[in-house]
Image (cartoon, helix red, strand yellow):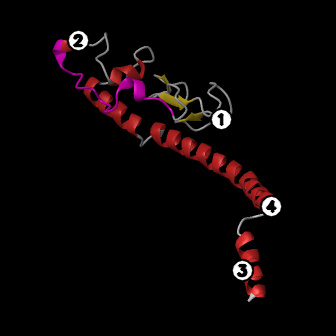
């Protein structure tokens, strides 16, 4: 009976993990995180780029609002009026004529920003889309005129 009691005590004592076992598990988790985290970060950036492309594309929500504006007013808002013309009547329009039937966009103007929190760059008439407007996002680097910009025109 004495031998059985000693074996039970040894089993009861050996319930935790050794420091070496814990360090091995932490090392394996750190190694996995080193591979997974950069991959997740890239997919987050790609998702933001996709959102920006869909927002400013020819069939996106901003384009739809600009088309409605043009249908009612007869022209796209010019550069000085900008996208603000989708939310409030531009000063150049006569309110009594009732041609402006906005607001043309559902979200508040301060929410009309790209996925990086920057305002979209709007120009009408456009330099690239001379018959309509140019609309772009500064992209992930938040600087206009760089290679990561997202726009609604095809490069020539």
User: Which of these two is toward me, 91 or 34?
Assistant: 34
Q: Residue at x 78, y 86 (%)?
A: 3
Q: Badge 2 local density, few (<14 within 10 Å), some, or many (20+)?
A: few
Provide the residue designation for mark 2: 94
Residue drawn at x 76%, y 81% is 7
Q: Position of residue 77 (x, y in %)?
A: 38, 21
Question: Which mark is drawn over residue 148?
Answer: 1
Res. 87 visible in picture: yes
The earlier-in-sequence mark between 3 and 2 is: 3
For disc 3, the neighbor class at 10 Å (few under 14, some 14 to 19, many from 20) is few
Q: Secondary structure at mark 4?
A: helix
Q: Would you say 116 lies left or right of 103 here?
A: right
- Which of discs 4 and 1 lies nearer the camera? The answer is 4
Label 1 sits on a secondary structure element that is: loop
Corner quadrant of residue 61? top left
Residue segment shown in magenta: 96-114
Residue beneath disc 3:
8
Q: Which disc number belongs to residue 50?
A: none
In the rendered image, residue 132, in percent from the top left (x then y), is placed at 44, 29
Dot 4 crowding, Cα within 10 Å, few <14, some 14–19, many 20+: few
The residue pinned by badge 4 equals 24
Viewer-proximal residue among 137 and 128:
137
Badge 3 element: helix
Query: For the residues marked 1 and 3, what is the alpha-carbon distance in whole angstroms?
Result: 67 Å
Check disc 2 and report its element: helix, strand or loop.
loop
Mark 3 vs mark 2, CA separation in Å: 93 Å
Question: Are circles 3 and 2 on residues that touch, CB within 8 Å?
Answer: no
Report whether 19 appears left or right of 12. right
Q: Depth-wise, is mark 3 or mark 4 nearer the camera?
A: 3
């Amino acid at each position: 009976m004495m031998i059985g009691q000693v074996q039970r005590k040894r089993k009861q004592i050996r319930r935790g993990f050794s420091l070496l076992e814990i360090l091995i598990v932490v090392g394996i988790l750190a190694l996995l995180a080193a591979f997974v985290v950069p991959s997740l970060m890239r997919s987050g950036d790609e998702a933001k780029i996709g959102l920006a492309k869909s927002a400013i594309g020819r069939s996106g929500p901003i384009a739809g609002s600009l088309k409605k504006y043009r249908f009612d007013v007869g022209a796209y808002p010019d550069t000085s009026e900008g996208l603000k013309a989708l939310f409030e009547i531009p000063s150049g329009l006569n309110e009594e004529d009732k041609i402006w039937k906005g607001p043309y966009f559902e979200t508040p103007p301060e929410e009309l920003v790209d996925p990086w929190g920057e305002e979209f760059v709007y120009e009408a008439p456009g330099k690239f889309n001379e018959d309509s407007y140019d609309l772009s996002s500064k992209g992930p680097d938040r600087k206009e005129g760089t290679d990561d910009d997202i726009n609604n025109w095809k490069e020539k």
